[in-house]
Image (cartoon, grey):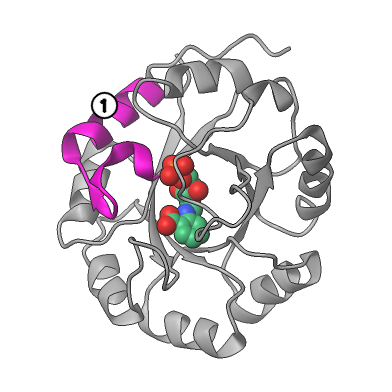
Amino acid sequence: MADVRVKICGLTRPGDMEMVAGAGASYAGLVFFGKSPRNVTPEVARDLALEAPVGLAKVGLMVNPTDEFLDEVMRLVPLDMVQLHGAETPERVAEVRARWGLPVMKAVGVGAVEDLEKLAVYQKVADQILVDAKPPKGADLPGGNGLAFDWKLIAGRRWSRPWMLAGGLTPENVGLAVAMTGTAQVDVSSGVESAPGIKDAGKVRAFVEAAKGAEAAPRL
Ligand SMILES: O=C(O)c1ccccc1NCC(=O)[C@H](O)[C@H](O)COP(=O)(O)O
């Protein structure tokens, strides 16, 4: 069995932190993006973060954040990691790491083999890489769209930094995703919701169980 670590992204409600930790998740994501159904204000995020049990890493997801917004979030919310999910350059990733002193996970959208070059660049500056599906053209959200990419594109590939697989994962397909890609970490949002922004405890439990129970494929 693969000892896969799970991130549940987009928590919005009191009790969500306890719920995902109880299910066995390692990371909980808080989304700071106005157009998202999972958006939380820094004040709400603070209340949620303060409920997190020890051992659950709180990840603050931002999209092209300004320095002022980062200052505000960092002042109010006790985060363990920043996730940058916009068009941040490698230089900006390095700057955020250095200036705010938290590990940074950079999301990279994958839709075709050319996109893999970006992973090689960002792995030099980020602490972790989120290998996510590329959003459809014109989408409102740069992530959290419930769409998968072709996992064959990354089967057998390895990077020098820890990385996480995301995009369209569900309790039903996460086992196959782990087996095909050999990933040690997975991230999910839409696939464990009963409605946009509302995490479903049964789906979260089923997802973590399926991820941790997956058979890792032999390294290709
Ligand atoms: O989830 C959002 O609403 C969101 C908004 C803006 C940028 C990124 C967003 N989510 C990123 C995540 O970390 C998701 O977990 C990841 O993209 C996978 O999402 P899903 O395909 O819905 O499982």
Q: Residue 159 sits in which quadrant?
A: top right
210 up-or-down from 117: above or below: above
Q: Residue 205 sits in which quadrant?
A: top left
Across and down, in percent, residue 97 comes to: 66, 71
Q: Furthest-bottom residue in view? A: 68
Q: Amino acid at mark 1?
A: Ala
Residue in front for this viewpoint, 52 or 190: 190
Q: Furthest-top residue in view? A: 218
Task: Report the side of 100 relative to 191 (left or right).
Answer: right
Across and down, in percent, residue 62 comes to: 52, 68
Residue in front for this viewpoint, 137 or 191: 137
Across and down, in percent, residue 29 comes to: 40, 56
Task: Report the side of 34 relative to 113 (left or right).
Answer: left
Q: Furthest-front residue in view? A: 138
The residue drawn where x is 32% and y is 29% is 207
Is 200 included in the stretch rendered in magenta?
yes
Q: Quadrant of the C terminus?
A: top right
The residue drawn where x is 70% and y is 44% is 161
Across and down, in percent, residue 200 comes to: 20, 41
Q: Give the residue number, with chain letter if any, for mark 1.
A: 206
58 up-or-down from 215: above or below: below
Residue in front for this viewpoint, 220 or 103: 220
The residue drawn where x is 51% and y is 39% is 167
91 up-or-down from 131: above or below: below
Task: Report the side of 216 relative to 56 (left or right).
Answer: right
Q: Residues within 10 Å of mark 1 (few under 14, many from 20)?
A: some
**Which residue range is magenta in the image?**
189-212
Mark 1 vs ligand 1: CB under 8 Å?
no
Provide the secondary structure element on which disc 1 rests.
Answer: helix
Is 36 included in the stretch rendered in magenta?
no
The residue drawn where x is 44% and y is 13% is 1
